[in-house]
Image: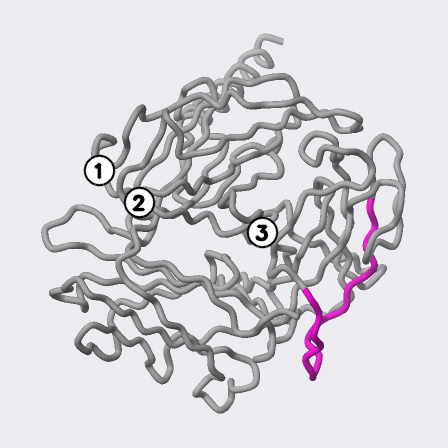
Amino acid sequence: MIRTGILLFLCLFSLQTLQAQQKFTYDNHVYSSQIKTVQLYNTQKEQSIPVIALGTSEKLNFSFDDLRGGSKNYWYTVEHCTYDWKSSNLSVLDYLDGMNEDRIIDYAYSSKTLQKFTHYSLTFPNDQVKPKISGNYLLKVYENGDVNKPVISQRFYITDPQVNIQSELIPSNDVALRFSHQKVNITILYTNPIQNPYQDIKLVLMQNGNPLTAKLNTKPTFVKPGSLIYNDLDGNNFPGSNEFRKFDFRSVRYKGEHVQDLFTDSTNNVVLFTDLNGSALKYTQQIDENGAFFIRNQDNIDNDTDSDYGHIQFSLNTVAPGKDGDIYVVGRFNNFTLTDENKLSYIAAKKKYYGSLYLKQGLYDYQYVWKDNATGNVDYTALEGSFFETENTYQAYVYFRRPGSRWDELIGYSLFNNLQKK
């Protein structure tokens, strides 16, 4: 009995020590399984990329749900980062006006839902926390004012526009990739002098706001008076992939798009129609939101507090693209991250892959990706196909490290796509 008690004490002590040592990562990450539906976007457009311009009235809206309910003591701060998402190691006084942290005081309890939760929200910059320089930033949320108890970290961007960005989307120059890849050419136009663009300028391109697709350009192909041109023959090729799959979980009473079955016991359960491997020979046009999701419900009034949660069952009928790998379901709803939570399992008796995610009522885009465990490579096309015609949005970020400066400024940002949605 004494030995059991000692073992229990050691286990609890080890767990507390591990929690005490937990640190923030410089990435979009949720550190507790009880935290769901994290959203961060420019208030001018729901689910937009979290980018705002310095010195303007633009704001970011941040929110999340805590499934434990009640009210918790959540605090937040922001940290300035380098272009490649490391700490800038600046003093808080260098990049913030006001206080260096504040408490999240706006919260509301769920209503008319089986799943009880508390919805927390925050709008910033505000009078308490106000960044004063441009660049990459990490929003950190932690419990009880203790930064060693991380809850959420989210990336966002503050621009100080000093350049214009011209973009061009063309088929890949590689003949073998011409019908499957999209090539991005960029021209940066500037008026203020840039002494050494090969060293001081960094260009980052991203597809559909997915950090895993980011491509870094450290050197322009051509430097002309007032312009930097990035158009290497083999540079900035992106797989077009396919349009995102989607489902409609706005109601717990009626079946929405792509919902095969819907039933409620102690919780809501949503069974989606079985998906097929999307590697078709021809592109099929359909409207999607490029991976975004929107919290909505048709059963009650308030989207934030009246929308319930449900277990969403995904199934995929396909043959594994490789010998040693795993299939994941991803989208903006989980920041395109690959975790055990969104990994599918193969059921041999049914010859299908299955997965389940606990999501809030709304409209969701998603896709299946294959990760090769031997190489660690993530393939977004093995299960979806890849077509030049696919409509994608791209983000271009231009960073400038002034001679003698200690941080990277974000002096340009552009959002563009290859096709106009009809």
**Residue 81 image label:** 2
Left or right position of 245 against 158: right
Q: The magenta stretch spans which residues?
A: 270-287
> Residue at 51% of width from left, 69% of height from top?
417
In the figure, 380 relative to 150: above or below?
A: below
**Residue 220 image label:** none
Secondary structure under the numbered disc 1 in the rendered image = loop
Residue closest to the eye, 370 or 228: 228
Can residue 403 be seen by looking at this rendering? yes
Q: Amino acid at mark 1?
A: Leu
Q: Amino acid at mark 2?
A: Cys
Residue 221 on the magenta span: no
Sooner in the amino-acid sequence: mark 2 or mark 3:
2
**Distance from Cα at disc 2 to Cα at disc 1:** 9 Å
Reading the image, the residue beneath label 3 is 332
Q: What is the count of numbered marks? A: 3
Local crowd size for mark 1, using a 10 Å CA cut-off: few (<14), some (14–19), many (≥20):
few
Reading the image, the residue beneath label 1 is 90
Residue 278 on the magenta span: yes
Percent of width and height locating residue 221:
26, 78
Residue closest to the eye, 72 or 377: 72
